[in-house]
Amino acid sequence: GQQVMQIPQYQHVQEGEDFTTYCNSSTTLSNIQWYKQRPGGHPVFLIQLVKSGEVKKQKRLTFQFGEAKKNSSLHITATQTTDVGTYFCAGPNYGQNFVFGPGTRLSVLP
Amino acid sequence: GAGVSQSPRYKVAKRGQDVALRCDPISGHVSLFWYQQALGQGPEFLTYFQNEAQLDKSGLPSDRFFAERPEGSVSTLKIQRTQQEDSAVYLCASSTGTPPSTDTQYFGPGTRLTVL
């Protein structure tokens, strides 16, 4: 079945440093979604990308969908302590289900 | 309601007991998903409903797991004869769209199930 991988698994950064997480799917995706889960919380939707090569920005967050629609990235500029959490990518699988990546856990040192 | 709600928030069961987990999606949302999230892992798909129809149950780990959404709103995930490996957080999510273009999935707070 479809596999979604993310790297790195963990990332520790100093506040103010940049952060990037990468998502790779074994199959082409019609769209990809990104979620953030704070410690002890539930996943919260960040964005959906649909078009090949699409780039979207939300303040300090930049999301990119690869040309082949098999990979994606999330880049955070000048991290803040409020960025702490686990970032998941997710994509539709065959049928009506969704596959989530294992996530990248970000910690930000003040 | 304001968001997706789930109850109970915490459930402790003895091995072999049956449990029922409830999800109240956002009113009017067509799609409802159940996920299982083990500690330190991403959510794993269990099953999907479009209104009252269960269109995909490929992620249910065994026939001990059963889900329903009889009136197309509230959903219940039932686990029979619980085992220790069932310990996890069970998340419910709803959305207005239908797969594969579901747009935003709104997650509930989850039910943390611990099987002793």
Image (cartoon, coloured by chain):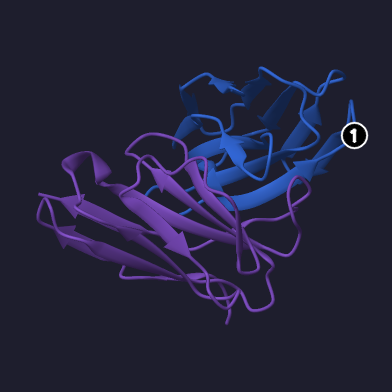
Chain colours: A blue, B purple
Tell which of B80 and A73 is nearer to you: B80
Residue shown at the point (88%, 32%) measured from the top left:
A54
**Hey, which residue is sitting farthest front in the picture?**
B63
Give the residue type that dot 1 points to. Answer: Lys
Q: Where is residue B4 in the image (x, y as percent from the top left)?
A: 53, 70
Residue shown at the point (46%, 36%) measured from the top left:
B42
Image-quadrant location for residue A10? top left
The answer to whether residue A40 is visible is: no
Residue shown at the point (52%, 69%) measured from the top left:
B69
Is A86 placed left or right of B37 in the picture?
Answer: right
Q: Position of residue B112 (x, y in %)?
A: 29, 56
**Label 1, on which residue?**
A51
Tell which of B67 and A99 is nearer to you: B67
Tell which of B44 and B50 is nearer to you: B50
Is B82 placed left or right of B7 in the picture?
Answer: left
- B97 versus B88 height, above or below: below
Image-quadrant location for residue A41? bottom left
**Hey, which residue is sitting farthest bottom in the picture?**
B1
Q: Where is residue B44 in the image (x, y as percent from the top left)?
A: 47, 39
